[in-house]
Image (cartoon, rainbow, N blue to C red):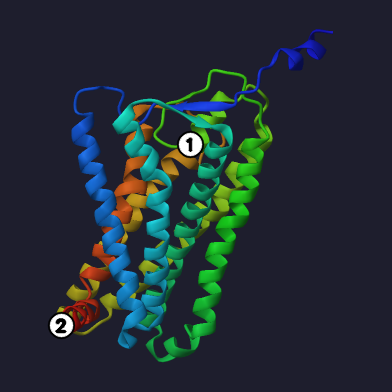
Amino acid sequence: MQRSLEPANLTSVQQFVLLGLSTRLSGRDTLFAVFLALYLLTLLENTLIVYLICTHGELRKPMYFFLGNLSGLEMCYVSVTMPTLLAGLWTGPFYVPFAACMTQLFFFISLICTECTLLASMAYDRCVAICRPLHYPLLMRPQVCLGLATSSWLGGLVVSVAKTTCIASLTYCGPNILNQFFCDVSPLLNLSCTHVALTELVDFISAIVIFWGTLLVALASYVAIAMAVLRMPSAAARHKAFSTCASHLAVVGIFYSAALFIYCRPSRIKSMDLNKVLSVVYTVVTPLCNPVIYCLRNREVHAALRKALRWS
């Protein structure tokens, strides 16, 4: 009898309260200005990359095809999380309707899964270019590149549909406060008052497939690149290749370290300030750094940029 009465006493939450990045009044204006500048700079960088790749024939290569996809994704990625981060810094804690929260969660999961797959595809592309240069035109022909990019985007959508559906189907009966600056998986699971075993299982499996799977592909590719570089006869060539790989590994390492710490756990984790700091790393820092690391240090991109400035 007691069990039959429990569902009737549950009141479904219709909206959530996002506490934002900081609940302190002091310093919020400064943080707002800093993150707004970072947001606009990220959009500018990635828009420039997409423009250069689309308008310059010398950049129509597999490497730049993936970089163009990554830049387009980064613009979408920061536009999903940064508006609520900025709104929280501007107004303080604010209400988000349930449907809007689930919509943000859907796009966030889809884009972060797509980014993992794209980073692995880019690492594989560089591995083939360095380790199998004679077979590179065949192994990375346009059909293969298009297939890898399409699989990345569609795979992210499929995973996001499964995870968001499970999370949205849970019952939230209060409290409704999310200690985060966007609607994230772990804070939402913490608020659920129903059994979350199935949702955690879906979350765990997707983490293994997407995060660990793509991470292993990326690491294996960079290990193969390192071994090929060590066999190069020229010290200058080895130094150049190692500096490029080190930069790429730094971005991949930062992104995966922060994401894996939060998402690759089968059990719920409490919302802590540390989680918000790590969330800033892979939602703000990596989209800002990726264009600089992958493109703006590249000689071909520099040449295309100089040509575009001369035309203007």
Amino acid at dot 2:
Arg
**Residue 89, horizontal then vertical, whole percent:** 30, 32
Q: Which numbered tag is attached to residue 310?
A: 2
Classify the position of the N terminus by image quarter.
Answer: top right
Q: Is residue 220 left or right of residue 278?
A: right
Residue 250 visible within the image: no
Which residue in the structure is indicated by mark 1? 183
**Which amino acid, mark 1?**
Cys
Residue name at image x 39 percent, y 34 percent: 181
Name the secondary structure under disc 1. Answer: loop
Q: Give the camera-side residue of 241 and 88.
A: 88
Q: Secondary structure at mark 2?
A: helix
Q: Is residue 30 left or right of residue 110?
A: left
Seen at 50% across and 33% down, the residue is 186
Q: Looking at the rendering, which quadrant does residue 97 occupy?
A: top right
Please give left or right for residue 14 compared with residue 31 in the image.
right
Residue 115 against residue 187 in the figure, above or below: below
Rendered image: mark on residue 202? none
| Residues at marks 1 and 2, CA–CA distance in whole angstroms | 44 Å
- Of badges 1 and 2, nearer the viewer stands 2
* Location of residue 171 with respect to 205 vertically, above or below: above
Residue, far bottom: 134
